Image: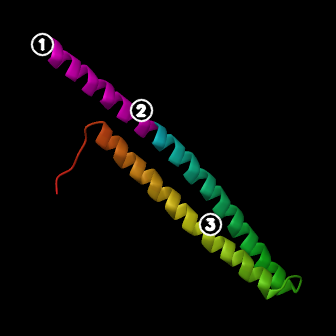
Amino acid sequence: MYREDLQDYQKTALSAFGDVENALDAVGETRMAAEAQAQSLRSAQTGAGMAQEGFHAGTTTILDVLNAEGALITADQLVAKAETARLQALVSLCDALGGGWRS
């Protein structure tokens, strides 16, 4: 009985450590992805600004402005998705560490 309980405890502990390790990995990966998406957003903002300046100066067309603004909207949406994934990974980490909340 004691050995069985000890084995069950060891399996549970190893599983819990694995869950925490996986959650930590996910937090790191999603943080890096969110940072990369934020950089893409900054680039899209710069591109949209340059397209608008070019349009006002008469060197680009309205189509260039619309394409740049479409890329900006897409980049903004990807930042929101990356941030959502990062926050979900943090919640998973809290859960793996034994945290919880009550409804």
Instruction: Give the alpha-carbon distance from disc 2 to disc 1, as whole Å.
Output: 28 Å
Check disc 3 and report its element: helix, strand or loop: helix
Q: Which mark is residue 15?
A: none
Q: Nearer the viewer, mark 3 or mark 2?
A: 2
x 25%, y 37%: residue: 98
Q: Nearer the viewer, mark 2 or mark 1?
A: 1
Provide the residue designation for mark 3: 75
* Amino acid at dot 3: Ala
Residue 44: x and y, percent? 70, 67
x 32%, y 42%: residue: 94
Does the CB distance between marks 2 and 1 fall below 8 Å? no
Q: Which residues are magenta?
A: 1-24
Provide the residue designation for mark 2: 21
Q: Nearer the viewer, mark 1 or mark 3?
A: 1
The answer to which of 51 and 33 lies nearer the viewer is 33
* Amino acid at dot 2: Glu
Image position of 102 with respect to 2: above or below: below
Image position of 15 with respect to 63: above or below: above
Image position of 6 with respect to 68: above or below: above
